[in-house]
Structure formats: structure tokens, C-alpha cells
Image: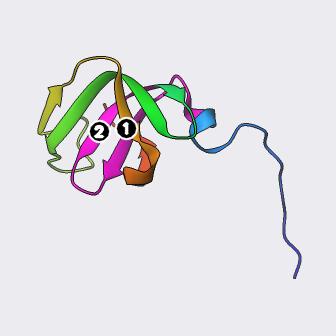
Amino acid sequence: MKRIIESDETSGFDAMLGEKVTLFCGIYIYTGVLSGVNDDHLELSEPKLVYETGELANEDWKDAQRLPSPWRVMRQGIESWGPAKC
């Protein structure tokens, strides 16, 4: 089987530094600007804790509350993540 393989030095969380991201964790959803990455945790600036998403296709969260900045989330608690919608 042939496959196309590309090498990218910046991938995963490193590639999203400075971008708005959403982190889906076991209980909570966090969103904000990814401002730091290390082996143990991610650091968010302009962080929010999402209590109610509403329709995920909508531009804004139904209920998202600001957290103190910066906010740190342990990497081991993240189940999925991607670009933030707001």
C-alpha cells in the first residue's frame, strides 16, 4: 500500500499556538487562545468555561463564563480539541 506522508515540525498543539481553541475534557469544556504548551498542561489566555454549548453550528456558545487569565488545563484530561467557534 502506498501512502502520502508529510513531515511537519509543528503539529498538534504547537501548530495552534496563538489560535483560539476548544478543549473537550471529561466533565468541562474550555475555550480560549492557546498561549502555552508543555509536557503537562496547556495554557489558555482569554479563557472561558463552557457550561452550555447550544447548537455547535452557531457562532457563539449558549453559556460560557470567563475564567481568570491565564488558565491551565492538564493534557491528560483532554478528550478532544479543535479550533474554537468564538
Q: Which residue is mark 1?
A: 73
Residue 44 visible in the displayed image: yes
Badge 2, how many Cα within 10 Å: few under 14, some, many 20+?
many
Query: Type of residue at label 1?
Result: Val
Disc 1 vs disc 2: Cβ atoms closer than 8 Å? yes
Percent position (x, y) of residue 11? Answer: 67, 42
Q: Earlier in the sequence, mark 1 or mark 2?
A: 2
Residue 80 visible in the displayed image: no
Q: Nearer the viewer, residue 28 or 41?
A: 41
Q: Nearer the viewer, residue 35 or 83?
A: 35
Please name the residue shown 41% across and 36% down the image. Answer: 21
The image quarter in which residue 51 lies:
top left
Distance from disc 1 to disc 2, alpha carbons, whole Å, reads: 8 Å
Q: Which residue is mark 2?
A: 30
Q: Nearer the viewer, residue 10 or 27?
A: 27
Percent position (x, y) of residue 62? Answer: 11, 39
Query: Type of residue at label 2?
Result: Tyr
Span shown in magenta: 16-34
Compared to residue 1, the image places residue 61 above or below, namely above
- Quadrant where the N terminus lies? bottom right
Q: Nearer the viewer, residue 13 or 82?
A: 13
Q: Secondary structure at mark 2?
A: strand
Q: Secondary structure at mark 1?
A: strand
Magenta region, mostly helix, strand or loop? strand
Q: Give the side of residue 21 with respect to residue 63, left or right.
A: right
The image quarter in which residue 69 lies:
top left
Q: Give the side of residue 1 with respect to residue 61, left or right.
A: right
